[in-house]
Image (spheres, coloured by chain):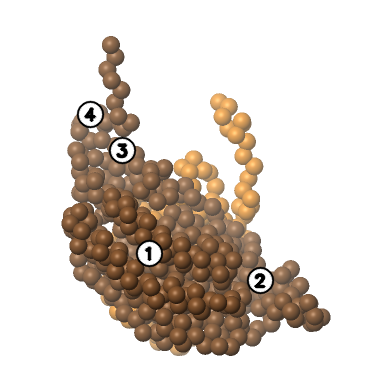
Chain colours: A orange, B brown
Amino acid sequence: MSPETQQSFPVAELLAWDPEAVFDGKLDYGELTLWIVPARILPVCERLKQEHGFRRLSSITAVDWWPVEPRFEVVYHLHNLERGQRLRLKCRLRADESIDSVTSVWRGADWYEREVFDMFGIHFRNHPDLRRILLPEDWTEHPLRKDFPVHGRRYDYAEADRP
Amino acid sequence: MSAPAGPQTTAQAGAEPRRLTLNMGPQHPSTHGVLRLVLELDGETVVRAQPEIGFLHTGIEKQCEQRFYHQVVPLTDRADYLAPLSNNLCYCLAVEKLLGLQVPPRAQWMRVMLAELTRLNSHLVWLGTHALDIGAMSVFLYCFREREDILRIFELFSGQRMMTSYFRIGGLALDAPRGWHQAVRRFIEGFPSKVDEYEDLLTRNPIWLRRTQGIGYVPLEELLELGVSGPMVRAAGLAWDIRKAEPYSGYEQFDFEVPTRTAGDVYARYQVRLEEMRQSARIIKQALEGMPSGPFLADAPQVVLPPREKMKTEMEALIYHFKLVTEGFRVPPGEVYQAVESPRGELAYYVVSDGSSKPWRLYMRTPSFANLQCLPRMLEGGLIADVVAGLGSLDFVLGDVDR
């Protein structure tokens, strides 16, 4: 992490509060990104909302870096309306790992986490209603994973109807 | 003799015999597309409202990962099909940020002008259909009269009425066509009086007032908690507009106001959107009068296609053209989050580049998806007759929700 990043708001305060939670950061294109230890995401988000004014959660999404491990990055975009500042949080996850849901911090996280679950198959612990949101309920795969072919898989309707 | 068949609903047996589960959509005319709403009713009161989405999911984000950067532009149109140019703009700005590309002033102003015409177009469709849902049929005809003029202007610029795909990474697809100035001027000078006509029909109409005032109220705190943006939060009292807060494409050079109301109900949202139309008209007028001359594409031969004439006469230009079309251009590794104020709220593209000529990941933060999330909060506890009023005031587009 560059010294400039370390001193910017709210990185300095976060590091003083819990030096273990943030393990890297960068300031690119005027956008601040922080890598958070996945186990600490919930307290970090609570802190950012309560103490540093990040009242809005703009979005939650994920990036699949397959075949690199850990393959997933869960990306949170936070927004502080008073300061007009945006902040990006990232958590790296292996395919078999899950992460705490932040619905207890922002209620709006509900649908975003369902979408990430639907598209990437990342499991959010303590989510109130973790179901598929865009795809049919009986769908079995996660299409935005890089190992899912863009044209999908061949589906045999005649075969599927047979008992 | 058998008992007459019951209505097409299922009464729940057991502890709460009066509860009724009602399926609204996905083919209901007032769900504006294919939204399915599962309503649980106690008499006429909505106890639970559960939106079911995904009927229009086409996997645009996945498709974007397979395309060269410049091939993504037409896909962005198809997400929010009522505001295609806002989507084009947001995507182009994001990639230009990654490339560090400077867009010439003429292209910036042209983009602003067309983005505001898009806002008018979208708000007109919203007003027409919203009033139609509530029962004011004639407003629809008035709104679509003006919308037709806007679509003609889009056709003049791009050859297309709806899926315009007019913006390019680095500028515009073509320079403005002959006669564009007169066409836009003729429209924009008459437009404010047309807004007066809509207001005459609705603003003090007692039926309209009783159907909208105090309906669908959600406090500002909860709206922000749920990630809602755009006219919805401005109608609840927060003067937050990305055009002012984080100006892009030269919006800081324009003089306009951010209208707000504090009531936070369906009527307040109506007032805010009507006032936004007047402000958009102001911006278009300023863009029209101060339109800079000069190039409409950035000076970046490695990204921008060479002019058609040069391509046909010069070897060098032909090579560039061939390379760009067949191989695309490389974008330095990195990630950007670019937000713009679409007619519906915060529209943002999160583009992740791995250094190749195709985006590694492209995420669309669409305003309709986030705004729709507040629907249960808005409808629960209200009357079933107010469901369509609440739905309409959200102004969502299902293409934008499902992508």
* Residue type highlighted by circle 3: Leu
Q: Position of residue B253 (x, y in %)?
A: 42, 87
Mark 1 residue crowding within 10 angstroms, few (<14) / some (14–19) / many (20+)? many
Q: Disc 1 designates what residue? A: B123
Residues flagged by tags 1 and 4 on a common chain: yes
The residue sitting at 24% across, 49% down in the picture is: B386
Residues at marks 2 and 4, CA–CA distance in whole angstroms: 60 Å
As shown in the figure, which amino acid type bears the numbered disc 4?
Gly
Q: Decide: marks 3, 4 in contact (CB < 8 A)?
A: no
Decide which of tag 1 and tag 3 comes sooner along the chain.
Answer: 3
Distance, label 1 to label 4, CA atoms, is 46 Å
Q: Earlier in the sequence, mark 1 or mark 4?
A: 4
Which residue is tagged 2? Answer: B356
* Residue on which disc 3 sits: B22
Q: On the rendered structure, is B235 left or right of A163?
A: left
Q: Nearer the viewer, mark 1 or mark 4?
A: 1
